[in-house]
Amino acid sequence: MSNQEKRVQKEETDDDPDEWEQRIFSTGCADENARLTDCYYEKKDWRQCKKEMEIFKECWKKHGNNNRTDTKDA
């Protein structure tokens, strides 16, 4: 088995959350993020995902992530 095949096999069987997943889960808004991402993937236009964006933003604020990431309202 080649190194490439071993890497692919490991990726397919690795159920541990990666760094990105851990960061998203730690925000408390992983589900909202997934729905927003899915909406964009399906529609290819952020303007058509305003409802999902508002839900995500409310979750983000509710969990205090603005303070954690030093984001500012525009």
Image (cartoon, helix red, strand yellow):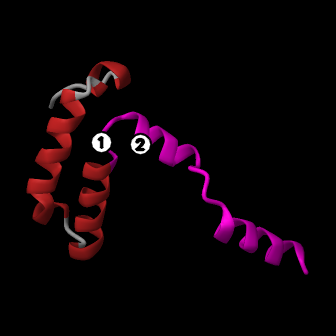
Q: Nearer the viewer, residue 16 or 27?
A: 16
Q: Which span is picked out in magenta?
A: 1-30
Label pair 2/1, CB-CB below 8 angstroms:
yes
**Disc 2/disc 1 C-alpha distance (Å):** 7 Å
* Quadrant assignment, res 38: bottom left
Q: Name the residue under label 1.
A: 29
Image quadrant in which the C terminus is located = top left
Q: Name the residue under label 2.
A: 24
Image quadrant in which the N terminus is located = bottom right
Q: Is label 1 in a helix, a strand or a loop?
A: loop
Query: Left or right: 60 with respect to 1?
Result: left
Q: Is label 2 in a helix, a strand or a loop?
A: helix
Q: In this view, does 1 lie above or below 46?
A: below
Residue 10 locus on image (x, y percent): 74, 66
Q: Residue at x 15, y 55 (%)?
A: 52
Q: Which residue is drawn at 90% across and 78% down?
A: 2
Q: Within the magenta stretch, is there residue 15? A: yes
Residue 50 locus on image (x, y percent): 10, 55
Main SS class of the magenta portion in the image: helix
* Amino acid at dot 2: Ile
